[in-house]
Amino acid sequence: MTPIRFLLKAAVFATGLAAFLQVYSVQAILPLLMRDLQASEVEAGLAVGATVLGVALMSPFIGMLSDAIGRKGLIVGSLLFLGLPTATMAGVTDIGQMLICRFLQGVAIPGITVVLIAYIGEEFGGRVMTKLMSLYVAGTVLGGFLGRFILGHLSEITGWRTACFVMAALCAACALFVAKQLPASQHFVAKPQMGNALRTLKSHLRNRRLLAACGLGACVLWSLVGCFTYINLHLAEAPYRLDSGSLANIFSVYLIGMVITPLSARLISRFGSTRAVMVAVGLSMAGVAATLLSPLPVIVAALTAMSSGVFITQAATINYIAANVQEGRSLASGLYYMGYYGGGTLGAWFCGLAYTQAGWPGVVWLLLAVQLCAVLIAKFGMEQ
């Protein structure tokens, strides 16, 4: 392995890590935000949902923008921009300001994730492309974990405001590294014609299979965001009373995605996307239900099962889109991520209402209802 090839892989990995370092990071400090910003449970939960909403709104359009202006510059620029609202979070004085900063983080993220996927597909082929895509996915999973882990533990040491500056510095460092090590595009051809994109969009909105995948994605992230946001408030209360560092440790179960995602390919190949989704959602439902049990180790095991089911479902859904959409795949992916992250926004909101009215059991019953919808979509909306 040459140094150049190693640095390319490191740059791709770092890009995925930096993007997802911020998406769910505040989940580990929600009790602190409620205390310091006088926020309700729903408002604190929307600190997660605001970022997810920004990603949802931008995902369908960022691919069109990238097709017109290029890849690498947009990736690096988005990484740098991501650090600005992250640093600004340190100075907010109320939950409204926090929600604005979190939304702006979400606006920046598709310029990293959607564009990097297009860049890899254009510039590389065969095993190199597959390897780089796997490294990107691994980076996103590790970033999702480290964001919660770092912010949670730093908040115990320095306070969450200072920790936000550290998170912003990490974004800037990744941006500089990617700018230096990611090669300039060699195969990019500008495609500024909006008419073709709009015709493709119209065709996609009539594609029942794609719409079913978008609905399934919405249910998936609704479940993940709702569960991992409000389990923190549940575990911060009696009898557990976990601090932000301990809550950050709970997210270690998220690392299961680094193992489950590659292994899920075997399940999908053997049973097909539809059956794999139904099995995975069943596993996730069992995990959600088991969180009603009291012992903390049982809850951690239940969260592991729940997240495993979610990762398998997402992998199967993306595979299903690739198999059933032949044209305009980047736009189709953007629509899927719009549904996916839109579901996450709704999950943060409605699960917050459920938590306010009925505590953690109320959230569990809502999540089970949403996952039942996912099973029905897979059974009747997706074709074998």
Image: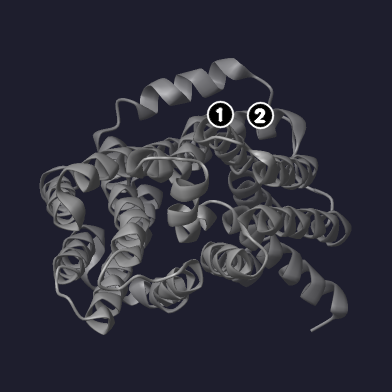
Q: In this view, does 294 lie above or below 341?
A: below
Disc 2, disc 1: CB below 8 Å?
A: yes
Nearest the camera: 108 or 252?
Answer: 252
Q: Cα distance, mark 2 to mark 1?
A: 7 Å
User: Is residue 146 rendered to the left or right of residue 284?
Assistant: right
Residue positioned 29% across, 35% down in the render: 211
Identity of the amino acid at label 1?
Phe
Q: Residues within 10 Å of mark 1 (few under 14, many from 20)?
A: some
Name the residue tied to disc 2: 65
Which residue is tagged 1? 61
Residue 325 in view in this figure: no
Circle 2 residues within 10 Å: few <14, some 14–19, many ≥20: some
Name the residue located 53 percent from the left edge and 51 percent from the top edge. Answer: 23
Amino acid at circle 2: Leu
| 320 and 95: which is toward the camera | 95
Q: Which mark is residue 190?
A: none
Horizontal and vertical percent for residue 241? 35, 70
Q: Which residue is drawn at 52% across and 47% down?
A: 36
Mark 2: which secondary structure? helix
In the displayed structure image, the side of residue 231 where residue 186 appears, left or right: right
Residue that appears at 36% across and 44% down: 344
